[in-house]
Every structure is written in structure tokens, then in C-alpha cells.
Amino acid sequence: MLSWLANAWRVPELRKRVLFTFMILALYRLGSWIPAPGVDSKTIQDYFNGRGGTILGLLNVFSGGALSQFALFALGIMPYVTASIILQLMTVVVPQLEQLQKEGESGYAKINQYTRYLTVVLAAAQSTGYAYLFKRAGNLNANTGRIVLIVVTLVAGTTLLMWLGELITKRGVGNGISLLIFASILSSAPTGIAAWYNGGTMERLFFPLVAIGIVAAVVFIQEGQRRIPIQYAKRMVGRRQTAGGSTYMPLRVNMAGVIPVIFAAAVMAFPPTIAQFFPTTQGWINTHFSYGSLLYIGLEGVLIIVFTYFYTAVQFNPVDQADNLRKYGGYIPGIRPGAPTAQYLDRVLTRLTLPGALYLAAIAVLPSIFIKYGGFSQATSRALGGTSVLIVVGVALDTMRQMESQMMMRNYEGFLK
């Protein structure tokens, strides 16, 4: 491993990219500790104590703890991620967006511009909601003018993060937006390590083994794919005859990524959040929707499976794939082009999505199971499972592939053999 890193460090361009990425991430973490103007971070932190299972606790994880400080980057990059998901879902129902998606690079640039506008709107709405929530709870002493200043500051922070993420993508290593979320999640690692160190004997002994097993399972499934053979026939283009060939269409086992887990976690966090405003139902909801209860584990698993099928259907359209294959003279051996190809792809994808959905559900509910039946502490179990591990491992694999391609271009031995 050290020799691979040494080879990477010898490449001047790659070294500059890595240093630039670390500089941006350090700037991001710095902004996560600087409070917004007129905010007492201590009072906001007191409000967040005991709210780990609510929607605020979930959003605080993705902001790297900046929300509990009400810092400059309190919103994190999640408004941009939410806007991207909304635009992606709207391409299915809005014909104009679907047409833009088919126009190639210019269409994607237009959709990206719409995403940025929607990000600013969502950030403004979200920051306004936070400000009035904290003011109503008595943790924010501010008049209307100060609230406007706080909202503008938080929206500017999210816009800056959006720009920094794009800078990492262009001039750094890996996907900038993913790396910002990666850094936010890793910022909670010291808390999890401290909780493990201060835990019981069984937790100290078995936690490393369980963590290694989960990471290995995530890597195995994330890299798993079904390769469907594709054959291209010879055809005439003008006066030239193109040679036919064979390739394959990779269908990933986990095509939906981490999005279903985020959706399910957000839905499951709503009941405890709403219960805070209705004291008469708070006891029942806290009992049945507590982190680790059987109802919580079961509903979260079912929601993840449902969202996995839904988001996979949005990501991959068998009819469009079949039309593209026929347009370029490609076909699946033994399958007729057109509708039969679409039906075959849909059947394969449906069967392939089931193990992917079960895998996501198992990874997400493991922390709850370890808390309830394994005797692990809540901080330790949340550090090793669910959304955090999926994002961290996925981003690490993607960044490693990009570094691998950079090194192979210069005839260096990379990370993968």
C-alpha cells in the first residue's frame, strides 16, 4: 500500500490534485466550526442533545456536526443533493427535462443550471425553517433583521460548498460533492472510536471484526454486476463499413446506490420529529419508533426495499436501452431487438434488484440490531453501519479508480492488480 501511495506521489499532476482536494476539504471543515453571525453555538448544541433519532439528528450527521453548531456550513451540501434527486425524478414525468437529458452535454449543462437554482431555493427555505425553529425553542435570540442575515449567510455557505465541490471535480481527485459528504461522515469517526474504547469487553473485542466484515460485504456487493453480452453487426456508414464487435452491458447489483437508505432514514425520522409538537403522542411514538425497536427495524427494511425498486426504475429504463441498442445495430444474442429486448432487460433487472435491495436493508438495520441485541453502544453501532459505511466505502472506491486511471496513463502500477 505504501509503495502504491509513493508511486502516486511521484506523479506531479496527481500530487497537485491530491493536495488541492485536501485543501478544499480542510476549508470545508473550518467553515463547519465557525458559527453564523449572532448565534450562540452552546445553546444550539443544548437543543440537539437527545435528538439523535429525529430528522434534525440525521441532517446533523450529513453536515458533519455543523448544524448542531449552526455554523456557516450548517446546511452542508444536502440541499444540492436533494435538488439533484428532485430534478432526476422530474425527468421521468416532465417531457421537457427528458428531452434535455437526451441532448447530451448541452442538455446536462442546462439541467445542472436548474439544479443550482433549486439548491438556492431549498437552502433558503431550510435555513429559514431552522432559524424560526431555534427561535421558537428559545435557543436563538434574534430579531427579524438578524434572522434574515443568518438565512443569507447559510444560503451563501451552501452556494460556496456547491462551487467548492465542482472545483474538486475539475481540479482535484474524485467527485467533489461525494467527497464533501465523505468528509462530513468521517468527522464523526473520533466519537465512534471513543465510544468503542470506553465500551464493554465484548464490544471492544467484537467491534473490529464486525466492522471489517461489514466493509468487506459492502465492497463485494458494490462491485458486483451482471454483464449482459452485446453483439454489434457490421453496417454501412456513408461509404465505409464499420466492423462489428462484441461487448457487454454491466448491470450493477446495487444500481440505486445509497439513495434508498437516505430516503428510508428520512421517513423514519419524521414520527419522532412530529411527536415533539404533540406531547400526547410523544410517549407512544418514542416507544415504538425508538432507534432499535422491532417496528423501527421492520419498517425501515421494507421502506429500503421499496425505494430501491423505485429508484432503480427511475435510473434505468429498459425501453430506452433497447431502442438505443437497435439504433446502433446492437443486439443481445438469442433475443430479438425491440420489445423482446426491453422485456428481457426488465426481467433481469427485477431479479437483480432483489438481492441489492435485501443487501441495502441488511446493512442499514445492522446498527439497530447491534444496539438492541448485541450490547453495543449507540454511538459505536452508528459509526459502523448503514448510510455512513455505504457512502464512505463507495466514495473511497470511486476515488481510488480515478487515481488508478491517472497512474495507468503514466505507466505506473496502480492500486488494482
Image (spheres, rainbow, N blue to C red):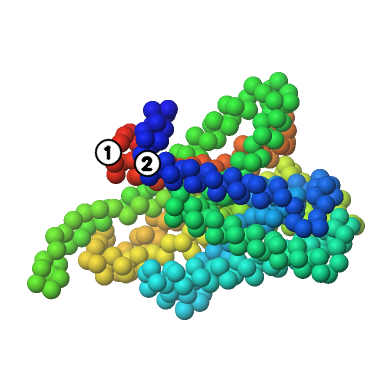
Q: Quadrant of residue 190?
A: top right
Numbered disc in front, either 2 or 1: 2
x 28%, y 65%: residue:
325
At label 2, the amino acid type is Pro
Q: Is residue 167 above or below residue 405?
A: below
x 42%, y 50%: residue:
252
At label 1, the amino acid type is Asn
Q: Is residue 317 left or right of residue 79?
A: left
- SS type, badge 2: helix
Give the residue at mark 2: 12
Q: Residues within 10 Å of mark 2 (few under 14, many from 20)?
A: few
Q: Quadrant of residue 13?
A: top left
Horizontal and vertical percent for residue 175? 48, 52
Q: Is residue 244 left or right of residue 360?
A: left
Horizontal and vertical percent for residue 355? 48, 47
Q: Is residue 165 left or right of residue 278?
A: left
Horizontal and vertical percent for residue 212? 54, 30
Do we see residue 407 in this rendering? yes
- SS type, badge 1: loop
Asked if the residue at tag 1 contacts the one at tag 2, i.e. Cβ–Cβ closer than 8 Å, the answer is no
Which residue is outermost to the left? 239
- The quadrant in which the N terminus is found is top left
The circle drawn on residue 411 is: 1
